[in-house]
Image (cartoon, grey):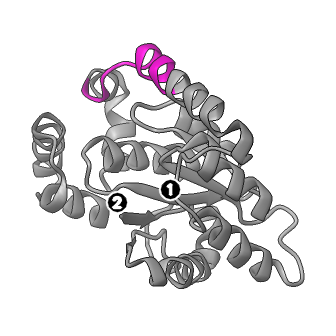
Amino acid sequence: MKIGIIQATSQKDKNELLYNCTANAVRRYGHDVVNFGCFPEEPVSFSYIEIAAAVSLLLASNAVDFIVTGCSSGQGMMLACNSLPHVICGYAANPQDAFLFGRINDGNAVSLPLGLNFGWAGEINLQCTIEMLFADAFGIGYPPQDAERKKQDTLLLKKINALTKRNAIDVFQQLDKTFIQKVLQKKNVVEYLLEYGREKDILEFIRVRAASRGYG
């Protein structure tokens, strides 16, 4: 699995911690972890909505398989991600949330509260939360006696999600051009998409708009 790390600028000071916690949690499973920031030294600030758009592009293009993200409360990022195509994002404030989301809901992104209630020993809760997210195979159902029913419910939810969300290109073409231009200022995301993305229509959409910014 290829896991992307990306969070809003409001919590840029937590980026290194978020990356390290994830890398430590998945090292034993052989997953690759790619850190997209937002980094403390980045000159451009990105809101949770702009980062959610980057999350959607990364997942829709199949450049990554899973995203670990967050904002101050974690709620805004979760809502923004779930408003965009190809994203099923859970909210995990603690290890129980993360474990149940992975086993039952089988999504492709998780949003963490990186500011709210992040007090003394907050890094311990973050590490344990991410460890429990990846502690077992996704989508196996829980509890064991209800696993098959839970898996069927998850499949139904994914079908509904696919039906009610438009194609990624249709959505991004309708979004305000200024908003798209801002999202594409996340240069490391754009470069990664162009190198590792596998959906030609999305890559062409990004390539045309990125070229106007002088890279791509």
How many circles with numbers are drawn on the protein? 2
Q: Residue at x 44, y 77 (%)?
A: 29
The quadrant of the image that shows the C terminus is: bottom left
**Left or right of 139, for residue 118:** right
* Tag 2: amino acid: Lys
Does 69 appear above or below 158? below
**Left or right of 157, for residue 150:** right
Q: Residues within 10 Å of mark 2 (few under 14, many from 20)?
A: many
The reply to whether callout 2 and callout 1 are in contact (CB within 8 Å) is: yes
Residue denoted by label 2: 186
> What residue range appears in magenta?
158-169
Give the dominant element type of the magenta stretch: helix, strand or loop.
Answer: helix
Does 21 appear above or below 8? below
* Tag 1: amino acid: Phe
Can you give x and y, in whole percent of width and height, for residue 179 in the image? 39, 38
Of labels 2 and 1, earlier in sequence is 1
Look at the image and tell me whether residue 160 can be seen. yes
Does 75 appear above or below 163? below
Can you give x and y, in whole percent of width and height, for residue 174 in the image? 33, 20
- Residue 158, numbered label: none
Q: Secondary structure at mark 1?
A: loop
- Residue 46, numbered label: 1
